Amino acid sequence: MARTRTVFVCQQCGNQQPRWLGRCPDCGTWDSFVEQTMRKGTAAQPQATPAATAQPITAVAAAGFARLPVEGEEFTRVLGGGLVPGSLVLIGGDPGIGKTTLLTQVGARFAARVGPVLYVSAEESVQQLRLRAERLGLLHERFFVLGETNLELIINAIGELQPALVIVDSIQTVYLEELASAAGSVSQVREGALRLLQVAKRSNTPILLVGHVTKEGVLAGPRVLEHIVDVVLYLEGERFHQYRILRGVKNRFGSTDEVGVFEMTQAGMREVSNPSQVFLAERSAGTPGSAVAVTMEGTRPLLVEIQALTAHTQNPQPRRTANGFDPNRLTMLIAVLSKRVGLPLFNQDIYVNVVGGLRISEPAADLAVATAIVSSFRNQRIDPHLVLVGEIGLSGELRSTSQLERRLSEAAKLGFRRAIYPHSAGEPRIGGELQLERARALDGAIRRALIDQAQAA
Ligand code: TYD
Ligand code: MG
């Protein structure tokens, strides 16, 4: 029978310890342990499927997954082609990033196209949900809303309505009565998700779960759920920029390489099908400090403007600020520029900004960032028709990057005329008018990228 014991559970990753710790040994989060009483024996286990027999892999039917269509190319692509019946999909993201807005849109359009949808709103009232849907022009009579936080009652409602899609917003605000801990705690979130997984598998209904990412560890983070659910998508972006990226982190039915790009507008989340054009739309091509990088978001090349500003300072510890770029990487690039290119940057504040609120996490943007810094420092413009691709090594050498052909083809498609990239990458075949220029080292690339005569800085 049920026994009670006390454990301390990390609210970020679910690590359990017999006593309180200041820092989680597993995920490194500080002050994230919360005492919980666990009732043994109540844990919901996924139902055992009928005994299976072993068979040669060649005898297994090669059919793909049946998929339900969802509206919108971006969302569909990230899912890997549509919603798989019976799948449990987690949509994580910071509060206020647009999860409810996106899922209201997805839900209402699914209702119009496929069948009844149940939107369980455990956070906002159904009136709020209606107001939003009305404002976005998404009212539909097959779009059902339920304001409920008790998971048993939610599951009953799913059984009664038998919808074609269920959305639970959010997993951290629903609770199971049988568990002692509060809604949002690790055990509630985990047990709740397991219970919904059962419902999804048994009824063959896809369920979308909203999960807030929390920094303070007050609520259990989506990391607790990642191994339970079939698909994990994160909605990312800077809250005060309009662009959002939906990124696949785990997908049992497709590739995790895909991203969808959205724009948060007055009329909800709008799909952006030509992101490069959008990110370059307000480019300050005429001013020093602006460079164009080609970054890969999954399998999709994306051209983005990188801006840099250097400003003289008396401060012995000059500022280095990066927006959308790894600050440690920036520090390294500045060191390489000082040592290998001979730029006296020790008395310069340096700011780097990736335009549009995008976050670049790959080193292929190094060359554009470094060149933008030099451009600002020397007050010389970079050729506005040029894209820069390449990782920079510690000795100032350019190192080749993955998927160069894709990147350069995208640049050619958008009308760029020159590309500087690492010598070691060979000579990819690119259509269009793009002039390909290989460079072995940073200083050579910089010399060719800047178009104005050198001026006294
Ligand atoms: P929301 O979807 O409620 O975020 P989440 O569910 O992830 O917490 O989005 C909230 C923000 O989105 C809020 O700051 C207002 C903004 N927003 C728009 O800019 N346009 C819109 O059409 C809507 C519905 C919201
Ligand atoms: Mg919300």
Image (cartoon, rainbow, N blue to C red):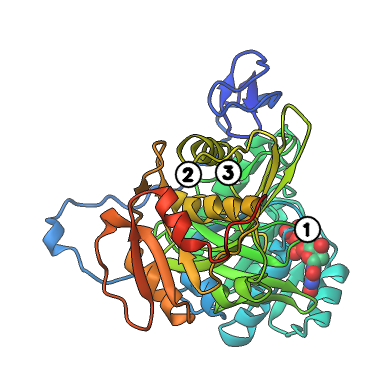
On the picture, is 9 further left or further right than 48? right
Where residue 247 sits: x, y (%)? 53, 59
Q: Which of the two labelled residues, at mark 3 and mark 2, occupies the earlier sequence position?
A: 2
Instruction: Tell me, yes or no, if residue 182 can be seen here.
Output: yes
Figure quarter occupied by ligand 1: bottom right
Where residue 337 sits: x, y (%)? 52, 41
Q: Residues within 10 Å of mark 2 (few under 14, many from 20)?
A: few
Residue picked out by circle 3: 326
Amino acid found under the numbered disc labelled 3: Asp
Q: Which mark is residue 148?
A: 1
Q: Residues within 10 Å of mark 3 (few under 14, many from 20)?
A: some
Give the SS element for disc 3: loop
Query: Mark 3: is the Cβ under 8 angstroms from ligand 1?
Result: no
Q: Which of the two labelled residues, at mark 1 and mark 3, occupies the earlier sequence position?
A: 1
Where residue 59 sits: x, y (%)? 13, 63
Picture quarter containing residue 273?
bottom right
Residue closest to the eye, 259 or 4: 259
Picture quarter containing residue 389?
bottom left
Q: In the displayed orientation, state which residue is furthest to the top.
A: 19
Q: CA distance from mark 2 to mark 1?
A: 26 Å
Where residue 104 sits: x, y (%)? 70, 72
Q: Residues within 10 Å of mark 1 (few under 14, many from 20)?
A: many
Give the SS element for disc 1: loop
Amino acid found under the numbered disc labelled 1: Glu
Looking at the figure, which quarter contains the N terminus? top right
Say which of marks 2 and 1 sits in front: 2
Residue closest to the eye, 298 or 219: 298
Q: Which of the two labelled residues, at mark 2 and mark 1, occupies the earlier sequence position?
A: 1
Query: Disc 3, disc 2: CB below 8 Å?
Result: no
On the picture, is 284 further left or further right than 295? right
Residue picked out by circle 2: 227
Amino acid found under the numbered disc labelled 2: His
